[in-house]
């Protein structure tokens, strides 16, 4: 398994439009468009930041994973996951399985921006929800 870089940092937010004002108007980052990923029940905005990106995630339903994260976090948004870009996602998942890691996704699924992604359970990563992505 070869990790190429931090692809993005996933930040859960209560209100995407409101949060975007901070990232674009105060930090001066550009929003590369907003996409709804039905499968994950999220509305997503990507903001390139040097060699990696910030991914803002707003839940589209009260029972989605982002809504649950915010609820557990006392109603506040915050860093929800870190995404590592790998050369070959299928090979990486095979390797992680062999190492006994607990995968949330046994098979790659569709991620925002056309990436192929899979999540690793925080139990296997010492506490961080880790997304592995390939573009
Ligand atoms: Zn992500």
Image (cartoon, helix red, strand yellow):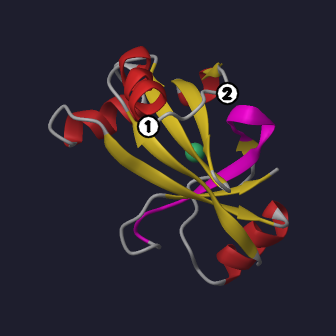
The kind of secondary structure element at disc 2 is: loop
72 lies left or right of 12: left
* Vertical position of residue 12 compared to residue 14: above or below: below
Query: Gap in Å between the C-alphas at discs 1 and 2?
Result: 15 Å
- Residue 37: % across, % down: 63, 24
* Vertical position of residue 92 compared to residue 78: above or below: below
- Residue 131: % across, % down: 59, 56
Judging depth in this view, the residue of 87 and 30 nearest the camera is: 30
- Disc on the earlier residue, 1 or 2: 1
- Residue 12: % across, % down: 39, 36
Which quadrant of the figure has residue 111?
top right
Q: Which residues are magenta?
A: 110-123
Q: Are marks 1 and 2 in contact (CB under 8 Å)?
A: no
Judging depth in this view, the residue of 36 and 19 nearest the camera is: 19
Judging depth in this view, the residue of 115 and 72 nearest the camera is: 115
* Vertical position of residue 89 compared to residue 74: above or below: below
Residue at (48, 61) in percent of width and height: 121
119 lies left or right of 72: right
Q: Can you tell which mark lies on residue 72? A: none
**Residue named by callout 1:** 27
- Residue 93: % across, % down: 73, 67
69 lies left or right of 8: left
Q: Nearer the viewer, mark 1 or mark 2?
A: 1
Label 1 beta carbon within 8 A of ligand 1: no
Residue at (76, 71) in percent of width and height: 92
Which quadrant of the figure has residue 25?
top left
- Please tell me how crowded label 1 is: few (under 14), some (14-19), or many (20+) other residues with Cα within 10 Å: few
**Residue named by callout 2:** 32
């Amino acid at each position: 398994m070869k990790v190429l870089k931090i692809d993005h940092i996933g930040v859960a937010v209560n209100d995407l439009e409101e949060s975007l004002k901070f990232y674009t108007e105060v930090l001066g980052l550009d929003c590369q468009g907003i996409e709804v990923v039905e499968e994950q029940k999220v509305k997503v905005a990507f903001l390139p930041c040097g060699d990696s990106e910030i991914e803002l995630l707003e839940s589209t339903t009260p029972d989605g994973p982002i809504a649950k994260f915010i609820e557990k976090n006392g109603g506040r948004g915050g860093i929800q996951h870190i995404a590592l870009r790998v050369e070959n996602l299928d090979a990486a998942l095979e390797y992680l399985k062999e190492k006994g890691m607990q995968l949330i996704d046994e098979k790659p699924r569709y991620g925002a921006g056309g990436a192929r992604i899979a999540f690793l359970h925080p139990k296997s990563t010492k506490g961080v929800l880790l997304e592995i992505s390939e573009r």
